[in-house]
Image (cartoon, grey):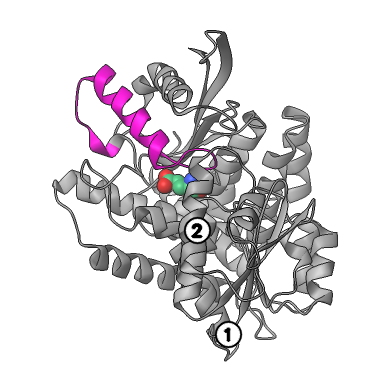
């Protein structure tokens, strides 16, 4: 494989799909050396096949808002790769959603799902529907209209969507209700992130954040260090940041910043249980303003407009919101303030220049596809429980999640350990995830 040639070809075929091209380049650069040691991969054109999705569904979604106006959005489902199992990955509702964004997310999902060691293929979907400021009824009507198109192409053994940015437990409830009504069957494994009691798994809401902190705990331990007393800056205040804040606080670390599109809340004494609970209300309000935390807890949280979480001094930085949210300048600010570890919890949360600066400074950096894999892993556990018509206890799920994250961490070390002894977590995650998919594709023939 010659990465430059493959990328030039892809750029010509998919001009302007910047996030997708960025995600592909990162993976190919990591796996190039290993790939070229396997002539059988080259012969089967594994990479050329892997970078193009199996198929993309694109559809119109029409719904009526509370003012009685007819609204039109675009809906998508990218079924990227099914070598390891039925397509699996979330749905993102955000005004910036387009095909490039969902192709990048679907591509990342293939390797992330592979790292979990569960039988999960990779996919992603969503819509340019903007949930900000929408009423509960508008969200319900949109979800129903979206499912009216999507239902034909999903199912437990076909493709199983879940949540992502803008899609949480409430949206999955409306989507599943519509699916059940249209498909006329209670196929619980067709969607994950359902509530407990009608097919949902305990610990699924917490899983992405818990898993991320389990991974970070190992990174910290690797440096003979401990979580207790560490200061952590998180971006966002959604489901992922909520889970991470809960587990980090439980382990004795101090979450000193959360942020939103409007600015940052600095929490000098560390986030409290009441504040963590309030993050759920902030998300449910659809206001998308982190300032609400400072208004609710004056004296504890200090809001600064138009600033990011990376402006706050911390030991551990965890982007938990959106792709490319941490720039090279942000990385330099974090480094100047003495950051010791950076772990992406959002998908591709750091820009390539930021990753480069962090790694060049010798600060351990872990990529989203490894750190945030606990979410989809627990979705896999939800599907397993659905298939067995059975529920595990919270302790059982948490234990399995913890083991999966430990195994992912070990794989990243195994494949990422460099000659000088330092661990390149990006390489480790990409190579470990890639090998399983490539070997499965090879075994399954030219399809
Ligand atoms: N959206 C999450 C992710 O990026 C979860 C996907 C899932 O559970 O299927 O992995």
Q: Is residue 418 above or below residue 196?
A: below
- Number of other residues with Cα within 10 Å of mark 1, as a class: few under 14, some 14 to 19, many 20 or more: some
Q: Is residue 391 above or below residue 413?
A: above
Q: In this view, does 409 lie above or below 291?
A: below
Name the disc covering residue 259, or none.
none
Task: Give the magenta-colored segment's residue range.
Answer: 161-189
Closer to the camera, 259 or 428? 259
Q: Mark 1 points at which residue?
A: 229
| Mark 2, secondary structure of its residue | helix
Q: In this view, does 166 lie above or below 358?
A: above
Closer to the camera, 341 or 287? 287
Q: Is mark 1 within 8 Å of ligand 1?
A: no
Question: What's the distance in space between the residues labelled 2 and 1, CA to CA?
Answer: 19 Å
- Residue reaching furthest to the left: 389
Closer to the camera, 243 or 113? 243
- Earlier along the polypeptide chain: callout 2 or callout 1? 1
Report which quarter residue 331 is drawn in: bottom right
Q: Name the residue under label 2.
A: 242
Visible residue check, residue 101: yes
Horizontally, residue 58 falls left or right of residue 379, namely: right
- Number of other residues with Cα within 10 Å of mark 2, as a class: few under 14, some 14 to 19, many 20 or more: many
Do labels 2 and 1 touch, CB within 8 Å? no
Horizontally, residue 112 falls left or right of residue 267, namely: left
Visible residue check, residue 160: no
**Residue 215, percent across and down?**
50, 71
Horizontally, residue 82 falls left or right of residue 92, namely: left
Rendered residue at 35%/65% (across/down)? 401
| Mark 1, secondary structure of its residue | loop
């Amino acid at each position: 494989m010659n990465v430059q040639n493959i990328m030039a070809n892809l750029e010509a075929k998919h001009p302007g799909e910047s996030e997708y091209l960025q995600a592909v380049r990162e993976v190919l650069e990591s796996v190039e050396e290993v790939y070229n040691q396997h002539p059988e991969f080259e012969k089967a054109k594994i990479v050329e096949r892997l970078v193009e999705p199996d198929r993309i569904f694109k559809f119109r979604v029409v719904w009526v808002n509370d003012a009685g106006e007819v609204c039109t959005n675009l809906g998508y489902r990218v079924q990227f790769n099914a070598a390891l199992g039925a397509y699996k990955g979330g749905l993102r509702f955000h005004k910036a959603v387009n095909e490039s964004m969902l192709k990048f997310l679907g591509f990342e999902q293939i390797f992330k799902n592979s790292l979990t060691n569960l039988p999960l293929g990779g996919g992603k979907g969503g819509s340019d529907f903007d949930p900000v400021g929408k009423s509960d009824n508008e969200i319900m009507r949109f979800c129903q209209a979206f499912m009216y198109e999507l239902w034909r192409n999903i199912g437990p053994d076909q493709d199983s969507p879940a949540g992502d940015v803008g899609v949480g437990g409430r949206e999955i409830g409306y989507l599943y209700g519509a699916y059940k009504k249209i498909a006329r069957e209670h196929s619980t494994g067709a969607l994950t992130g359902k509530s407990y009691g009608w097919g949902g798994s305990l610990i699924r809401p917490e899983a992405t954040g818990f898993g991320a902190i389990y991974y970070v705990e190992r990174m910290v331990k690797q440096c003979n260090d401990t979580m207790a007393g560490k200061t952590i800056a998180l971006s966002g205040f959604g489901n992922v940041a909520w889970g991470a804040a809960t587990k980090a606080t439980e382990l004795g670390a101090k979450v000193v910043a959360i942020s939103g599109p409007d600015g940052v809340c600095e929490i000098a004494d560390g986030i409290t249980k009441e504040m963590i609970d309030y993050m759920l209300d902030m998300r449910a309000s659809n206001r998308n303003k982190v300032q609400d935390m400072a208004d609710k807890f004056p004296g504890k949280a200090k809001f600064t407009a138009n600033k990011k979480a990376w402006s706050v001094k911390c030991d551990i930085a965890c982007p938990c919101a959106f792709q490319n949210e941490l720039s090279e300048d942000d990385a330099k600010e974090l480094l100047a303030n003495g950051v010791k570890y950076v772990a992406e919890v959002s998908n591709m949360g750091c820009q390539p220049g930021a990753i480069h600066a962090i790694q060049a400074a010798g600060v351990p950096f872990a990529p989203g596809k490894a750190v945030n894999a606990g979410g989809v892993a627990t979705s896999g556990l939800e599907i397993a429980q659905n298939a067995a018509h059975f529920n595990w206890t919270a302790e059982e799920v948490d234990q399995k999640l913890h083991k999966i994250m430990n195994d992912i961490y070990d794989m990243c070390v195994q494949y990422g350990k460099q000659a000088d002894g330092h661990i390149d977590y990006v390489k480790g995650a990409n190579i470990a995830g890639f090998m399983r998919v490539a070997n499965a594709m090879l075994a399954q023939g030219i399809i």
